[in-house]
Amino acid sequence: MERVAQERKTKSWIKLGGVADEVEKAQISLAKPILINPGRVGLIAVDSIAMATPIVTRILDYTHAPEIDFLSPPHSICMTRPDLQSFVNGAIHLLKKPEEKEKMSQSLVSQQQKYGIEQMVLRFHNHVLKII
């Protein structure tokens, strides 16, 4: 993908990601983008909630990681058919419909309380107490 972007001299507003550290994630979240993830959704679901940034991904023949259950299509994640054209169309649709993207972002904000670190630790703590 990087090679194609370089060959086509991709516009400066398109940033190819990859693995991002906390500083890079903070910078990404300030740009108010969409997260385009053609592969397996895992911990990026948590980043999506924390950044209030919707993900565009594909329905896969294999499964996404359990974290995808934190998100609910079409309210907080855009899941397209697996073919490339559907995937690209899903991303373009969100980019051209900022009001729809904003609704998804608001849905993600509402999930921050539920999946915030404090709530996750509290649930973990309560389950450990149930076990012992």
Image (cartoon, helix red, strand yellow):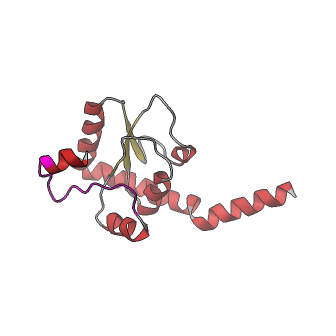
- As rendered, which of 42 and 48 lies closer to the eye? 42
Instruction: Tell me the quarter of the image containing the N terminus.
Output: top left
User: Which region of the structure is painted magenta?
Assistant: 7-20
Is 17 rendered above or below residue 92?
below
- Prevalent SS, magenta region: loop
Going by the image, does 30 lie left or right of 76?
Answer: left
In percent of the image, x 42 and y 66: which residue is there?
21
Q: Position of residue 120 (x, y in %)?
A: 64, 61
In percent of the image, x 44 and y 53: which residue is there?
107
Residue most toward the front? 3
- As rendered, which of 108 and 6 lies closer to the eye? 6
Q: Position of residue 52 (x, y in %)?
A: 41, 59
Q: Is residue 18 magenta?
A: yes
In percent of the image, x 15 and y 52: which residue is there?
10
Residue most toward the right? 132
- As rendered, which of 102 and 47 lies closer to the eye? 47
Instruction: Tell me the quarter of the image containing the C terminus.
Output: bottom right
In percent of the image, x 79 and y 59: which residue is there?
128
> Which of the 4 image quarters holds residue 129?
bottom right
- As rendered, which of 55 and 107 lies closer to the eye? 55
Is 110 rendered above or below residue 36?
below
Query: What is the total number of numbered labels drawn onto the structure image?
Result: 0
Going by the image, does 7 lie left or right of 16?
Answer: left
Q: Is residue 63 magenta?
A: no
Going by the image, does 87 lie left or right of 23?
Answer: left
Q: Position of residue 97 (x, y in %)?
A: 24, 48
